[in-house]
Amino acid sequence: MTRTRIAVIGAGLVGSVVALELAARGAAVTLIERASRPMTGASLHNEGKVHLGFVYAMDPTGNTRERMIEGAMHFAPILDRICGPLPWEAIRTEGFRYAVMPDSLADPGTLEAAYADVDSRSRALLDDRPDLSYLGLSPHSFWASSDDDRGRPVVDGRPVETLYRTAELAIDPRTVALAVVDALDAHPSIDVLAGHRVIEAQRSPSGGFGLTTIVGDTPAVTHADAVVNCAWADRTRLDGTVGMTPERQRWSYRTKYSIVVRPHSPDHGLVPVTMVQGPYGDLVPRTDGTVYISWYPVARTYFGAAPPPDVDSDEARRVAVGSLNVLGRMFPSLAGAPVISSKPGVIIAEASTDVDDPTSGLHIREELGVTGADGWWSVQPAKLTTAPLTGVRAASHVVAALGLETTAVA
């Protein structure tokens, strides 16, 4: 019996999970990635935070916090199932501090109400689902006010007044990426076509699709019975080549740099920090002695309704130095730290204004998952936190539509 051949476009975390889930249900999968390897884009170059929803304090409905919590509690169980157990204890950070900046868009009272909401929703889900965990943990409390100076930035010569200690963690995305790539390489039903950029798709008269790709300068065609489009910045354009109407959302594209530095002293005393609420930044110490940093006013270099243009190495250096100069004044242990890397990443979300606008859609993440029919499905962009659960649910949707073997999943 000939197996259904499904092409998955895009080998970030969502696309890779979709490919692994479909292959586990009996499909033959062709995973197409424009980069030289899977998991080398936004899924790799980020701070690694597995959100519990604290940063979405300005969503009055609480729906975004609910989505983040659900994704966070499924994150480790799903990846452990499809990749084998990961060393969560070794790759997770200590809890994030949330520092309220002097010109924050939200006052402490508003933030504390949202943080209490995170706490109650998180504990309720873990109580209801003992099979879930937060990166291998089941915290009894998720936030509290902090009098500790660790994580307290200095702004205009004065430490910020309000600081919260949370149970929110980051993981090293490099370890997750390696585990996912190993799982893809080991699966006999998945063919990875790396270095293939999909130009267009056409429905074949006899059924299925022909995907035209460029490999270097050489065109090629890949055939598939069905397609799951998990491309990143190019997703809606590819949908249009098969006549799929764009979703109602207005997608925005942002280029934001992921910068890694190495403080001069290994005893730098830094802890994970997110500065709220607005266009500020983060820092995340990693176990290898490096620190991820981001200062949004410098590191976010593009905002628009169309995918961003390519960037050059000179910009990468300028962004890194500019971000480090600001954060080095706030956190003296960072001052003068050598830059290890500075890499741009594209963030996609529904919004027409940036995070400095209190009414911006960036303060709300209403991901709708998978859309499409007739053999072509399009999976909307997800955050790192929600990517594994989005991938599992997208694969389940496709499995049901195609009548493939079914297995209970999260």
Image (tube, helix red, strand yellow):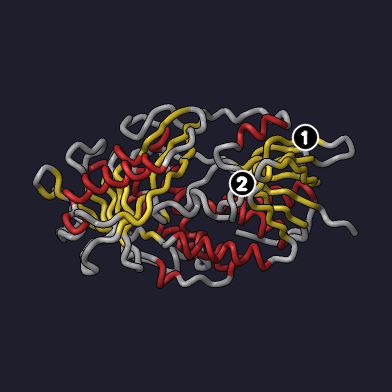
Which residue appears at 73% of the width and 48% of the height? 7
Name which residue lies at 79% across and 40% down. 209
Disc 2 on helix, strand or loop? loop
The answer to whether residue 119 of the structure is visible from this angle is no
Left or right of 121: which side holds 374?
A: right
Q: Secondary structure at mark 1?
A: strand
Q: Which residue is mark 1?
A: 202
* x, y percent for residue 95: 31, 61
Give the amino acid at mark 1: Gln
Q: Which residue is mark 2?
A: 34
Residue extending farthest to the left is: 157
| Spatial separation of the CA atoms under disc 1 and disc 2 | 19 Å
Please state if 407 lies on the left or on the right of 328 as rendered: right
Of labels 1 and 2, earlier in sequence is: 2
Residue 295 in the image: x percent, y percent? 29, 44
Q: Quadrant of residue 103?
A: top left
